[in-house]
Image (cartoon, rainbow, N blue to C red):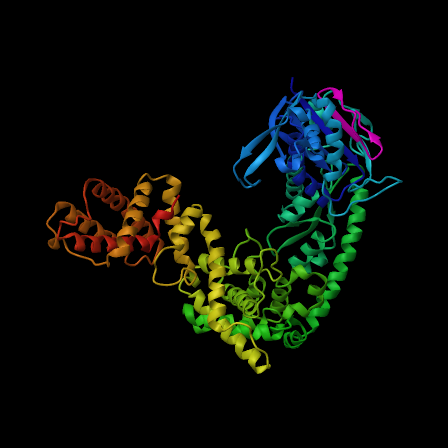
Amino acid sequence: MAFELLFEIGAEELPSSFVDGALAALPELVRGKLAAARLGHGDVHVYGTPRRLAVLVHAVDDAQADLDETVIGPPEAAAYKDGKPTKAAEAFAAKCGTSVDALTLQDFEANGKQKAGRYVVGRRQEKGRPARDLLPAALAELCTQIPFRKSMRWGNLDVTFGRPVQWLVALAGSEILPVTFAGISAGRETRGHRFLAPARVALANAADYAGELAKHHVIVDRNARAALMVERVAAAAQAAGGDYDRAQLLIDENASLVEEPFVVTGTYDPAFLALPAAVIRAVARGHQRYFCVEKSEDELLPTYLAVVNTANKPEIVAKGMDRVMRARLSDARFFYEEDKKAPIDARLAKLAGIVFHNRLGTVREKVDRIVRVAGSIADSIGVSAEIKGKILEAAALCKFDLVSLMVGEFPELQGHMGRAYALHAGKDPQVADALRDHYKPVGASDAIAEDVVAAAVALADRVDTLVGCFAVGLEPTGSADPFALRRNVIAALRTVMENPALYTLDLVALFGVAYDALAEGLTAAGKKLDLSREETVKKLETFAQDRLRGLLAAHGGNGVADAVLAARTGSSVVAHPVGALARAKAIGAAVARKDPWLEKARTVAKRLAGISKDAKPALAEASAFTKETDATIVALVHDLDGATASLASAAELEAAVAKMEPFAKTLDEIFVGTLVNDPADDKTPARLALLSYGAGCMLRLGDFAKIQ
């Protein structure tokens, strides 16, 4: 009969990252242990708090399945000598649990594991053992395999763990399993909340685990604990008159720092609100992991929220927190006031003292290149003289805050401090915002820089980094990407694809502009690049296309991405990725709807691809043919040609994809019912040339043969 298996390891407080790392690894570790023991089971649930890691496995088989298998042993030459069994044969027989006389010889063909030849074969039979006999050793071994960034030894023990182990619980249903680890024997007693319910808690049954601990102020399910925490934080923020800081970092770390989340509200002197909101957030998030209470991105309330592990004496907790916040905000205010005393020009001059890369010059030289590339972007997209001026000014100022005291203390504030100091110096707000936003997108799910000034600087910065690194041989390898070039190229592609102001930009041409700016600057400094302009642009284009495929696959899968990348658009797909995105969305929508004509389109695309190999494409009129089916083909090709001639907008692409339905369905019927490549028909060459032209029209949208 199957049973519920519970195994809990109680320890001294584990760091948040240790808990999260263990919870990520435990499911597969447990499944592996049970598979090795040949024990079937149901769902595996893992639980974790700072004081415990636990696993609950449903429907574990009461015993192993009986084993009866044929095992291939050593080759005959190794197993027998002069007709007598060798040590190898005896060892193999012992492994199978049988006698040497019971072994047989059998011929085998070559496969991936062995060469062709004659091998010893044995039959291994084993009665399935009870699960309760197998699990103690497997669970003890599991304790040694849970990964921690750093492990500890304690006492005179040889074992290691993330923190010293304090207790073990191991239950098979209601029965205690005799597991021993770190000198501790498992029982049925767990521990409640350290402060609110410190008494031992006896579990009658494994299935009672989560519910029983919840009665003792321990929420063992991390997701449930995080949801409760967010609910309580949101309520406290609303009571304070605002909303809470939504940074995922705060939610993730705080959820694994407590066993039950309680929220304490702290306050600070409203005079600190003269600091930029980003500075106060950085201080609160920093080591304290506090949630700021805010009205908007730039307007905070003099209140913050802390997630703590006890409801006892919150006023004392708040008093201590306030003291820490006051000290840290005072330090930040000192840095801020000192930074404001330095003029921006002085900061720009100091950038010459920061090396971006020993082969690519200083940050000051990088800024000069960003200005040139950003100016080219402004010219390419046709902005007004006023906007171009703002782009050039933002590009020139985009890195000046790197030498500020505040960014030295809080590196995550780069850009934010540039905006604050630029506004203080009286710079245009659009320019100041660009100093902050040109770092966007920071992560895969982050928004791009939407304003045209910020987007131009963001793109120029990333393109300079990409071109520079590729030109001196610093492209990523399979295991290393120290300059985050994959992330940079994805950010560049997204910035062009998702910002309407950049739709007309030729990204490949921009690579060339960035190379020229780099080569001229390094030549003046007596330095050389490893790759030529053509080699660098080509390599970077291939690199960008690989990343573009992943972005397109999000709109319909790999088949849609491959189909779009194979489209014949008259230029590189990387040059104008916005067109590729529009195609992926239009075709991906048809795939998502499971439009039945797509299968017809795949078939037709394959047939037309074969025709196109031998026939030169040519458009013809109906008067050139006599058959009714030929007139239908002419009408279909002319219709699709007109629909795919421009494709300059999403609406035109959607209309062209809609035209594919009658084209694919009707042409498939004609292929089934008519011999289009009839050698006896004098119209066949013109028909094949027309169909080859139709194949080209389809390829303007994409290669439908690649859609899965």
Q: Is residue 81 left or right of residue 650?
A: right
Residue 52 position within the rendered picture, expressed as x and y whole percent measured from the top left: 75, 35
Q: Quadrant of the N terminus?
A: top right
> Considering depth in this image, is 382 or 358 the residue closer to the camera?
358
Count of numbered tags = 0
The residue shown at (44%, 45%) is: 557
Residue 27 shows in this picture: yes
Image quarter of residue 615: bottom left
Q: Is residue 171 magenta?
A: yes
Judged from this view, the residue extending furthest toward the right is: 156
The answer to which image quadrant residue 201 occupies is top right
Locate residue 496, reporting x and y percent. 46, 60
In the image: residue 626, left or right of residue 707: left
Query: In the displayed image of the protein, which residue is found farthest to the top?
Result: 1
* Residue at figure coordinates x 78%, y 45% from the top left: 151
User: What residue span does the magenta drawing correspond to?
Assistant: 168-187
Residue 393 visible, this angle: no
In the image, what residue occupies the spot 72% across and 40% down?
146
Q: Position of residue 463 (x, y in %)?
A: 52, 66
In the rendered view of the protein, which quadrant contains the C terminus?
top left
Residue sticking out furthest to the front:
82
Is 285 magenta? The answer is: no
Where is residue 250 shown, x and y percent of the image? 67, 47
